Amino acid sequence: MRDGDSRRRFSSVGAAAAVSLMLAALIVAAGAQEAAAGQGRGAAPAQGDGRGRGDQPPQTARAAAPIDLTGWWVSIVTEDWRWRMVTPAKGDYASVPLTNEGRRAADTWDPAKDEREGNACKSYGAAAIMRVPERVHVTWENDTTLKIETDAGTQTRLLHFGDAQPSAGEQGWQGYSVATWEIAGGPPGGRGGPGFPGGGGGRGAPPAGAPPAPKFGSLKVMTTRMKAGYLRKNGVPYSENTVLTEYFDRHTEANGDEWFTVTTIVDDPKYLNQPFITSSGFKKERDGSKWRPTPCTAT
């Protein structure tokens, strides 16, 4: 091989190698910049990952709770007495934003028919049960399911955290409820997946070994798949397409009394012109000694 040809071939190979190295360097640099940008933004892991500093597993809904709703509670009726403490007269649907179809349905209320057809629990469904004068018992059925039992109508509500899906089947009085913790000062659901606040590990995370910061927040519950029922005892209707949204907040009075308040928002495109919003208060009791389960009644 001539010296000139040799030099030309090595020169070509060297140039190609240099170009390849430059491209590789650019790709690596771009990847590093992207990773750094993600860290700087405090990017959250994929939903449901929830792993933070030290690759810790995500907290369960029970462990992550910013408020404690468990215990025995009694409803304290301070408003809407005429609609809550006694069965209103037929056709009394004042303050409920009913459509024309809703008023017609309310005007045909027949409690004897409800009893005969096995529908005495129509006013004890999820959209109305927290307005009933009653006692409730709140417990954790497991780490991702909060249970609310009522003595009035002997009803049970299950509030599901996480990714659980309703099983196929017919709708029920209490429907299917999906719960999430809303943490004060942070995004709903946090970094630990649906209903779980915070996996930690980004900028601003507490140093290892530091005591946990106090938690503040509320419980949000969305319920669907309900059987059609009554917002009030006297047949004021809601349909099977209703979407129920609730917010549970807890507070302690200066005298030490403990309360939770549930704000209820009922959306029903069939029977309501606009959302029907109420707020109900429950006071904590020492124990279940006053618990008196009673069956549903149509009047």
Image (tube, rainbow, N blue to C red):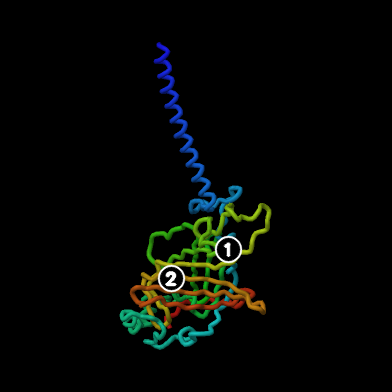
Question: As rendered, which of 220 and 207 lies closer to the eye?
Answer: 207
Amino acid type of the residue that numbered disc 2 sits on in the rendered structure: Leu
Horizontal arrangement in the rendering, residue 209 relative to residue 12 (left or right): right
What SS does tag 1 mark?
loop
Residue 241: quarter of image: bottom left
Residue placed at 44% from the left, 74% from the top?
265
Residue placed at 42% from the left, 74% from the top?
266
In the rendering, at what x and y percent does residue 141 appear? 55, 62
Question: As rendered, which of 173 and 188 lies closer to the eye?
Answer: 188
Question: As rendered, which of 178 and 218 lies closer to the eye?
Answer: 218
In the rendering, at what x and y percent does residue 151 appear? 53, 75
Residue under label 1, please give it: 65
Q: Residues within 10 Å of mark 2 (few under 14, many from 20)?
A: many
In the rendering, at what x and y percent does residue 53 appear? 60, 50
Amino acid type of the residue that numbered disc 1 sits on in the rendered structure: Ala
Alpha carbon separation for disc pair 1 and 2:
22 Å
Residue placed at 46% from the left, 38% from the top?
27
